[in-house]
Amino acid sequence: MAARPCTRNRQPDTAGLRKSPGLPIAAGMDPQAKPQDPETQPPRRDRLAHYVTQLVGDSKLPLFSKRLLDILALGTQDRTSAHKLADLVLEDYALTVNVLRMANSFHYNRSNRPIENVSHAIVVLGMDTVRRLASTLVYFLAFEKRSASLRELMIQSMLSAHVAAVVAEKTTFARREDAYLAAMLLNLGEVLVACHSPEHYMIIRAEAREGTPMREACQRRLGFTFEGVALGVGTHWRLSSDLASIWDEHGAPPHLAALARLGNELSRLMYKPSTKHAAGMQLIIFRYGYTLKLKEDDLPGIWERAVEETRSMFGTLGVMVGSHIALPAIGAQP
């Protein structure tokens, strides 16, 4: 079934929350809906479960989530998994074309021999790399054309993924591809809210721009956090506990979560050229430096390489990054 595009964002206060087909958002969450009898509204403590149920029931989510989950669930060593991965990619023509396009880019294939099919790509590039490419494309292409805010989130997700992968390699974390995927999916909850509740999301972002912490603005507007949404959907998807740990808001993060969060925080910090970087980088090192064995001096090189790899990926996919989207170097002046 073809995915129905999300409503393009307009002024936050002029339109009600977009309804998911078959499962309308509760009136208590829709500014323009008629009030319900208090007994029929979900209590505030139950809003998250109610919202996740609606997301899972949305007609556009199962196709996207099933393909992504099938790819993420594959092993990386046995021949059977390689055949399954090739079959999953080949089920989607656009995915097949884009995997081959990326596999034949200079970044991945520096030989003079073209990679002519998905099975050949798995042999040449390895199962992990093709699995990462396919997961990236399924996630990125599912959302990036839907609205300006979602496109921005997708670009930040890709930057975060490349930062985490570079840090994983630098710190000899054995599962570089897992670090990439964890960072890519870290803002899943924010992506889903931006897609399914665009008016609420625009208001949350407006409050954040005025200085309200994003978490506080989200909690006040919706009654739950982006991380709660991601963890709820991830639980329904039966993601591994290791991957689900990236959304755990309590306790010290394990190594994989620390990589994902560092990637996300550095990308958000650097995304706008007007950002004051020094204090933000010091805070990032304070949070994750000990766990990941990083120093503040390591961040410029990490960022520059992540930007280079992200630009290469966008160029290969033919994704135009407009002039309003900045991928600045650390220390660059606005």
Image (tube, rainbow, N blue to C red):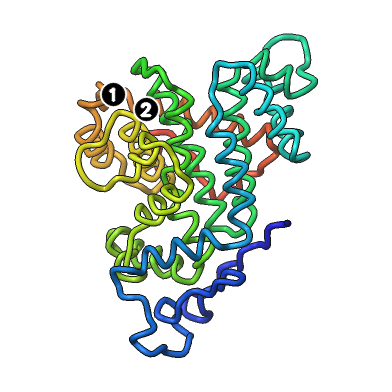
Question: Which three-letter amino acid code belongs to the residue tagged 1?
Answer: Asp
Q: Which mark is residue 300?
A: 2
Quarter-of-image position of residue 105: top right
Question: Could one spot residue 275 in this view of the protein?
Answer: yes
Above or below 67: residue 299? above
x and y, in percent, of residue 181 in the image: 48, 34
Along the line of sight, the residue nearer the viewer: 139 or 319: 139
Would residue 72 appear left or right of 290 to someone viewing this image?
A: right
Q: Quadrant of the C terminus?
A: top left
Quarter-of-image position of residue 79: top right
- State how far apart marks 1 and 2 are (Cα): 7 Å
Above or below 236: residue 261? above
Q: Are marks 1 and 2 in contact (CB under 8 Å)?
A: yes
Along the line of sight, the residue nearer the viewer: 81 or 44: 81
Q: Residue at x 66, y 62 (%)?
A: 5
Along the line of sight, the residue nearer the viewer: 228 or 215: 228
Secondary element at image label 1: helix
Q: Which mark is residue 297?
A: 1
x and y, in percent, of residue 196 in the image: 53, 64
Question: Which three-letter amino acid code belongs to the residue tagged 2?
Answer: Pro
Q: Quadrant of the N terminus?
A: bottom right
Q: Residue at x 43, y 36 (%)?
A: 182
Quarter-of-image position of residue 278: top left
